Image (cartoon, helix red, strand yellow):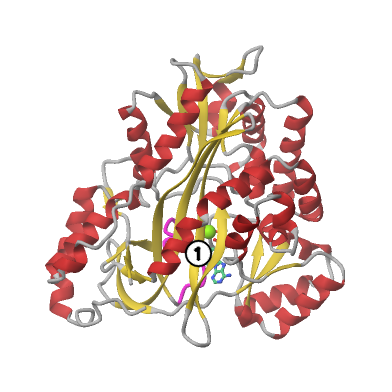
Amino acid sequence: MAAPWQDVVRDAAAVRDAAAVAVDAALLAGVLMRTGEQPLSSDVVNYAPFTLLPSAVPRALFEQAYAVQQDFNLLVDAISQNKEFLEQTLASTIKVDDFTARLFRIYMQVLEEGLAQTVFLGINRSDYMFDCGLDGTAALKQIEINTIAASFGGLTSRTADVHGLVLKVLGKTKEASRLLPNNPAKGLALGVAKAWELYGSQSAVVMFLVEEVQRNIFDQRCVENELWNRNIRVIRRRFRDVFEKGSLDGSRRLYMDNQEVAVVYYREGYVPQTYNQQNWEARLLLERSRAVKCPDIATQLAGTKKVQQELSRPGTLEKLLPGRPEAVARMRATFAGLYSLDEGEEGDKIAATAIADPARFVLKPQREGGGNNLYDEELRQVLQKIKDSPERTSYILMDKIKPQPALNYLLRAHSPLQVSECISELGIFGVYVRQGQEMVLNEAAGHLLRTKAIQHADGGVAAGVAVLDTPYLV
Ligand code: ADP
Ligand code: MG
């Protein structure tokens, strides 16, 4: 998988020149983040961290990831409509994991009342690594599907141009012309716009449900501006605003500050720390409403690690998507080994195996956002401690994917320029819209490549570990 720039990667002078051009190009292109010191103001901004060089990605695996995305869209949507499956799958988890339990309770409450929502919008991102086999061949292996607040579709729409310029500066003009155009921001906005249109109220707005601390606002603005360009009004609100000012009318239409809301696009709400009692109430209000939630609470639950693990059991995909054996085969080909830690013999056995050989596995709790997984010695210690307690059930085990590292430079504000051994993770954005039982839109909307130094087992861009990248197909 060697990229064709191994000749320049050690040329200190060329790298220094290219890095200076790269940083300014990123600022000009809008590859931006607010700073940690001033996360609520755009007075001072930095470039979002990115690689100096585009990373090599095997063309066949890249195409495989695109080809399976519509299948994953259908799957997530099918799970979200399958109460029996969600109930059974999460039964053991919600006994021990309070966060999943609270989400699940809202899900049940909304079902009992009866859904007011008739249009459904899914925006997800399926993430993969390239697992290097013993014979050196790479295979596409899914890390997870993010069904809520999948980010960086905006900023990554602007990184290919930056990397193209860097390659030209390094004398790689022909290679620069081979970088693929990529515009997930536009694809995501098309999905939101379609949902807004089907909701059917010209004067209604799209509400971005955003965090208290908004460092990654520019990523969201990319999607917002695409909507404004289609003459769709966008407002940004936090859970606490919804608690204070949100209301439902008699037919459960959602109003914020006297404006009707057609679509609620969550860029927040996937970690327990977000929720105090008021914010849980706000979440319930949104879920009960007629507005199109992206995602609705069922689709958020479909993205849990526990669901992912159950999907890998023989026969499960077939049951969820009957009559689609080809889609099932395409999806299954991307699955790594996943193991239940539920109480019983199966869980006992795999727990013992992982304690004996922790380097083979990743231990994952039901959390999102990076930095929660356990590896190696820490995995061993934690599993040893909880192996005979029900707490074990709140985790799953997964085979560790081992990609082939490559040299690159991770450009970060205020950090020295130094070469690192890196591995990459490819994400494909999926967008779908369903009205009643009819799928009206089902697409792959673009890609995201994130790269990190091999010293870090975990963590995404927002966590300060991975950086934005552009695939160079080989
Ligand atoms: P989160 O929901 O917190 O993002 P992920 O499952 O995506 O959880 O894991 C976070 C990060 O940990 C990934 O981006 C990847 O770098 C690493 N990781 C997760 N699963 C594996 C795995 N099976 N093998 C190797 N690395 C993994
Ligand atoms: Mg992830």
The residue singled out by tag 1 in the image is: 128
Q: Give coordinates of residue 166: x percent, y percent.
A: 18, 64
Residue at 56% of width from left, 55% of height from top? Answer: 145
Q: Which residue type carries mark 1? A: Tyr
Dot 1: what SS?
A: strand
44 left or right, relative to 346: left
Horizontal and vertical percent position of residue 65 = 48, 60
Q: Compared to 73, does 408 lie above or below?
A: below
Q: Nearer the viewer, residue 427 or 373?
A: 427
* Residue 1 left/right relative to 315: left
- The reply to whether the magenta stretch includes residue 462 is yes
The furthest residue to the right? 344
Task: Farthest residue to the top: give it.
Answer: 250
The picture quadrant where one finds residue 188 is top left
Q: Give the x, y percent position of residue 345.
A: 87, 73
The percent coordinates of residue 453 (x first, y second) are 40, 73
Q: Is residue 334 magenta?
A: no
The quarter of the picture where residue 179 lies is bottom left
The front one of 287 and 126 is 126
Would residue 272 be seen by someone viewing this image from the given angle? no
Measuring 42% from the left and 68% from the top, which residue is drawn there?
A: 60
Q: Residue at x 49, y 16 (%)?
A: 201
- The number of numbered discs placed on residues in the rendered structure image is 1
Taking the image as shown, residue 321 lies to the left or right of residue 429, namely: right
Question: Does residue 332 show up?
Answer: yes
Magenta region: 455-466
Task: Please say if 355 is above or below 293.
Answer: below
Q: Quadrant of the N terminus?
A: bottom left
Screen quadrant of the C terminus: bottom left
Decide which of 445, 44 is in the foreground and name it: 445
Please give the name of the residue rendered at 43% of the width and 62% of the height, measured from the top-left corner.
63
